[in-house]
Image (tube, rainbow, N blue to C red):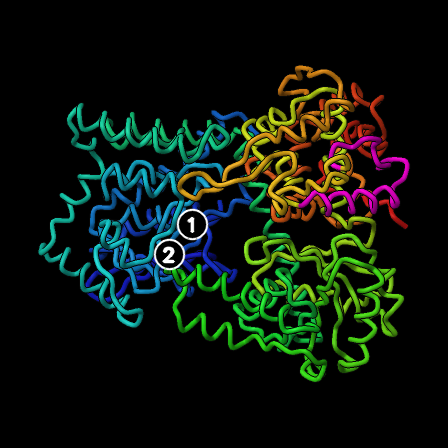
Amino acid sequence: MIYQGNGLSAQLLDDGIVELCFDSKGSVNALNIATLEEYKSAIIAIGECIDAKGVVVTSAKSTFIVGADITEFTELFKTPDDKIAGVFKNSSDIFDMFEDLNMPTIAAINGFALGGGCEVTLVCDYRVADTTASVGLPEVKLGLIPGFGGTVRLPRVIGIDNALEWMTGGKPYKAAKALEFGAVDAVVAPENLKSAAIEMLKDAIAGKFDWQAKRQEKLEPVALTPIEHAMSFNTAKGMIFAKAGKHYPAPMILANLLEESVKLDRTQAMLLENAAFGQVAKTDACAAQVGLFLSDQVVKGKAKKAAKIATKKVERAAVLGAGIMGGGIAYQSAYKGTPIVMKDINNAALDLGLNTAAGILTKSVDKGRMTAKKMAQTLNNITPTLTYDSIKDVDIVVEAVVENPNVKAAVLKEVEANVSDDAIITSNTSTISIDLLAQSIEKPERFCGMHFFNPVNKMPLVEVIRGKDTSDETVAAVVAYAAKMGKSPIVVNDCPGFYINRVLFPYFSGFAQLVLEGANYEKVDKVMEKQFGWPMGPAYLLDVVGIDTADHCTDVMAAGFPTRMAKISNDPSSVLYNEKLLGQKTGSGFYEYSKDKRGRPQKAVNAKALELFSPICAAETEFTNDEIIARVMIPLVNETVRCLEEGVVATAAEADMGLIYGLGFPPFRGGPIRYLETVGLEAFIETADKYAHLGEIYQVTDGLREMAASGKSYFNTNVNTAK
């Protein structure tokens, strides 16, 4: 053994071959600070071994290296950018040391080689991958750029245009595709990976391959004429800006970096990468996207834990109500492998549900995302029925009938009489109290809410709503089932609107007040879409949700929180509702909806809406972008804080992911709590206090003031004061 560490080893094999094997203590290989130091020590030991003639880099895990351990760098990213650059220079120097070993090197890639893992392969002279492998540099998805020399080496291995595509897109590539790009030199069957890599290495040692020349290409500037250079980067930067926009700075920082670094040798180019990494790591978008990744890990971790502890396994499901929502739920369950019975009271409804599922599947087949065989398997997993006979042996029932408490209560009572004693019963409701519905159930401990979002096949979130009598076993089983369906479940406690709608309607209320004060709602939408980053502004979102649905939810929220969310007199949405202008479903709401000459949907401000609003709204008044953002976002953030303080949602991570997954909160802002902390608690309070006279939704909690005074973060502080 040449070197033995905790996370990797270097062993001398036959014929002077050294196997440098990554084998972290966890389930996967990740590059943390300790592993990088061991990597350096192993490189030194290999260089000093007089019998070493070549190095093959392998993994003892089922996957190569999944990347850097981002959790170790989050605190570093809060330090000055020159310090960050210095730390990453030390790390990239280690990679340079390996590349400079006086012998040929090859990486044997299995599973994922992403981020830092891909950069480990790039310092090798050759790369052979097995057919299961995927390689890539996805750092932009965390608001970052490669930091271990990837920006220097990849353009010299696969060319500038290809490297820009890889790094600014952040997409991993399967082995066969990576071979086409030239990112790997060979692809072999998994059982032949190590032997093939060693044979290639022996050929390099024997002089059959000119490994020195191959390495030299990575040390020198890229050979481009000025015209070629200008064409590559002018075209690429235009495409990058069009796709990433101003809210995601990492791709453009990366393009600007490569524009300069490809003209330099490795040493100079690496210094530019170090500096650029320090720059991008300090952006708000990076903090938000890294935070988003960590929050997502919290949600996924809880789902995995639920799957392990769940005593009730869901092998067969049922959905009651075969409308568009029921059909979507049936599709999602069936597609992910859990057979489901779809029950309704008439064949027309069953046809609608089946057509909904079939429509989703057909689109996937047409786009090449699914085979016809998979479509048939999915449809065969859905059993339509008009009777309760087919649900007597299911493990879980999702009630998805009309949003009416009396109807739901009657259906739930019928369901309980027709399922096994240990079957779990859930209600897909967006507003009706779970505790209220539980009154119709004899065993409320096996009942909870399971709130899907429309369209079910596209929206990742499922709110699992715990009632006061819901058992932990029921919650665990439902969370596990939601995760099995491919969803991101978040457990919330019962309250009016649960979590998502509870924080959404103060946002709508802030918007309504703005319109009544004379704000142009089309401008508000544009500001919230273009400046803040929402996929839809509030007026457009109300039209999509349905003005009737919004009006009903407003009544529910007003009843639940009468002092804070009382219905606004002459609320513009209510005015539209009274005129039966219900948004997209009727073709007219805040906007009029139609199709252009090519059949593409389009919208325009509804003149009828302006006419209806004229008597109730002030004369058109100009509000700044910052005023608009503050007026609609402060109520949403305040209500999110209240949900944390009241224990409606357990953690800041789940609060953020709920709005990311359920409402499309701008990912580059990281969620409402990450946004709050990026703005700064004191700065947020100062702005909110300016609008406190507008009502309780603008008034921050005492808990938020205490958090600001103490300098704490919601991400590591439990603020739940609920008894």
Going by the image, does 634 lie left or right of 49?
Answer: right
Label 2: which residue? 3
Residue found at x 22% / y 36%: 219
Helix, strand or loop at label 2? It is: strand
Crowding near the residue tagged with mark 1, few <14, some 14–19, many ≥20 C-alpha atoms within 10 Å? some
On the image, the x and y values in percent for residue 98 come to 30, 45
Give the answer, above or below, for where 400 lies relative to 53: below
> Are the residues tagged 2 and 1 within 8 Å (C-beta)?
yes
The mark nearer the N terminus, 2 or 1, is: 2
Q: Quadrant of the N terminus?
A: bottom left
The location of residue 518, given as percent across then percent down, is 72, 19
* Rendered view: 710 above or below 411: above
* In the image: residue 593, left or right of residue 549: left
Residue on which disc 1 sits: 38
Q: Position of residue 376 (x, y in %)?
A: 45, 74
Magenta region: which residues?
A: 546-573
Amino acid under disc 1: Glu
Q: Quadrant of residue 85?
A: top left
Residue 205: say if magenta. Answer: no
Of the pair 352 and 56, the residue shown nearer to us? 352
Determine crowd level at label 2: few under 14, some 14-19, many 20+ residues with C-alpha closer than 10 A. Answer: some
Which x, y percent locates residue 11? 32, 61
Identified at 31% across, 50% down, the residue is 121
Q: Nearer the viewer, residue 274 or 177?
A: 177
- Viewer-nearest of labels 2 and 1? 1
| Residue at (74% x, 53% y) in the render | 430
Name the residue type under label 2. Tyr
Q: Is residue 722 visible?
A: yes
Q: Is residue 640 in view?
A: no
| Rendered image quadrant of residue 317 | bottom right
